[in-house]
Image (cartoon, helix red, strand yellow):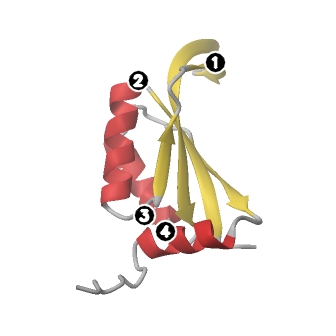
């Protein structure tokens, strides 16, 4: 295992998705967030009824150690009462990409400028 995760969060619309993505990267809770351009169609049960919605999906690259803070922050920024916040482990990946992720996540030591 790499200790890294891909978290998925569905958002009400692209505007909300962009706001959450920016905050997570700015606050070093995610190394990268993909905002899927096309909306996804979600079918789910809510309060006893089957609902349908068009949503925007975020694919968030983060670390297991950061996930609890990421989850709290998404809940603060999200409009849904129960937002979808799930994570899947990254079991393997490019060493260079995983190292890059580590560099930009919260708690990672920052490299000094060579200037």
Q: Which residue is mark 4?
A: 66
As displayed, is residue 81 above or below residue 5? above
Q: Secondary structure at mark 3?
A: helix
Residue sitting at 49 percent across and 68 percent down? 66
Q: Which residue is mark 1?
A: 48
Which comes sooner in the sequence, label 2 or label 4? 2
Instruction: Residue 5 in the image: state x and y as whole percent.
Output: 63, 60
- Of the two numbered discs 2 and 1 in the rendering, the one whose residue sits closer to the viewer: 2
- Of the two numbered discs 1 and 3 in the rendering, the one whose residue sits closer to the viewer: 3
Other-residue count near label 4 (Cα within 10 Å), few / some / many at <14 / 14–19 / ≥20: some
Q: Secondary structure at mark 2?
A: loop
CA–CA distance in space, label 4 to label 3: 6 Å
- 95 left or right of 112? right
Other-residue count near label 3 (Cα within 10 Å), few / some / many at <14 / 14–19 / ≥20: few
Q: Residue furthest left?
A: 115
CA–CA distance in space, label 1 to label 3: 31 Å
Q: Secondary structure at mark 1?
A: loop
Q: Is residue 105 visible?
A: no
Q: Which residue is mark 3?
A: 69
Residue sitting at 30 percent across and 58 percent down? 26
**Badge 1 vs badge 3, beta-carbon distance below 8 Å:** no
Q: Which residue is mark 2?
A: 13
- 2 left or right of 12? right
Which comes sooner in the sequence, label 2 or label 1? 2
Q: How many marks?
A: 4
**Badge 4 vs badge 3, beta-carbon distance below 8 Å:** yes
Residue sitting at 52 percent across and 67 percent down? 101
Q: Secondary structure at mark 4?
A: loop
Quadrant showing the C terminus = bottom left
């Amino acid at each position: 295992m790499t200790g890294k995760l891909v978290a998925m969060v569905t958002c009400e619309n692209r505007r909300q998705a962009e706001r959450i993505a920016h905050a997570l990267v700015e606050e070093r809770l995610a190394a990268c967030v993909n905002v899927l351009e096309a909306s996804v169609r979600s079918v789910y049960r809510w309060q006893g009824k089957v609902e349908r919605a068009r949503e925007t999906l975020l694919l968030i690259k983060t670390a297991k150690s950061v996930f609890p803070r990421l989850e709290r922050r998404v809940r603060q920024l999200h409009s849904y009462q129960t937002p979808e916040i799930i994570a899947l482990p990254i079991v393997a990946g490019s060493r260079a990409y995983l190292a890059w992720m580590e560099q930009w996540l919260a708690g990672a030591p920052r490299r000094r400028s060579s200037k």
